[in-house]
Amino acid sequence: MRVRKTLFAAAHAVATAAAGSAWAQAQAEFTDEQLESFVVAAVAVQELIREWNPRIEGAENAEQAAELREQANTELVEAVNGTDGITLEQYQEIGEAAQSDPDLASRIQEIHQEQAGN
């Protein structure tokens, strides 16, 4: 459960950072390959968030925090764009769809567990 929430939080962070609006499609259909790529990207995003959060929280002032957030957002977008088999838009669509579709969320969790077992 915690892993799933973290993945979705990471997905939402990138979606919020990269765009002002969500591109989720109601009852969207995604291939297993897209979902596998989503999980790979979400894990990379999660790691970056873990790295950046303490730096942002430790900023000396609001201006420095904003600069650090901008740098972090750039790296988050690069992490998603650097993942084979998924675009930033697809990543955002899957993340948003998973928040409202329990079946999709379960499938993503299964894929994450399969990948973690490898």
Image (cartoon, helix red, strand yellow):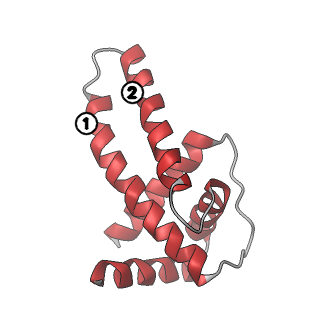
Q: Count neighbours of disc 2 (C-alpha within 10 A) and say few if under 14, some if 14 to 19, many if 20 or more.
A: some
Q: Which residue is drawn at 29% across and 48% down?
A: 50
Residue 6 point in image, percent of width and height: 38, 61
Q: Mark 2 points at which residue?
A: 68
| Number of numbered callouts drawn | 2
Say which of 31 and 4 sits in front: 31
Kind of residue at badge 1: Pro
Say which of 6 and 18 sits in front: 18
Residue 73 point in image, percent of width and height: 48, 38
For the N terminus, the image quarter is bottom left
Q: Which residue is drawn at 51% across and 61% down?
A: 83
Tell me the number on the disc at residue 10: none
Mark whose residue sits in front, 2 or 1 = 2
- Helix, strand or loop status at disc 2: helix
Q: Residue at x 38, y 62 (%)?
A: 43
Residue 106 point in image, percent of width and height: 49, 81
Tell me the number on the disc at residue 54: 1
Quarter location, residue 9: bottom left
Q: Which residue is drawn at 49% across and 77% down?
A: 108
* Dots 2, 1 in contact, CB < 8 A: no
Kind of residue at badge 2: Leu
Residue 117 point in image, percent of width and height: 28, 84
Q: Is residue 41 left or right of residue 98?
A: left
Q: Is residue 77 left or right of residue 109?
A: right
Say which of 57 and 75 sits in front: 75
For the C terminus, the image quarter is bottom left
Give the spatial CA distance, label 2 vs label 1: 10 Å
Q: In this view, does 69 lie above or below 63?
A: below
Q: Residue furthest right?
A: 26
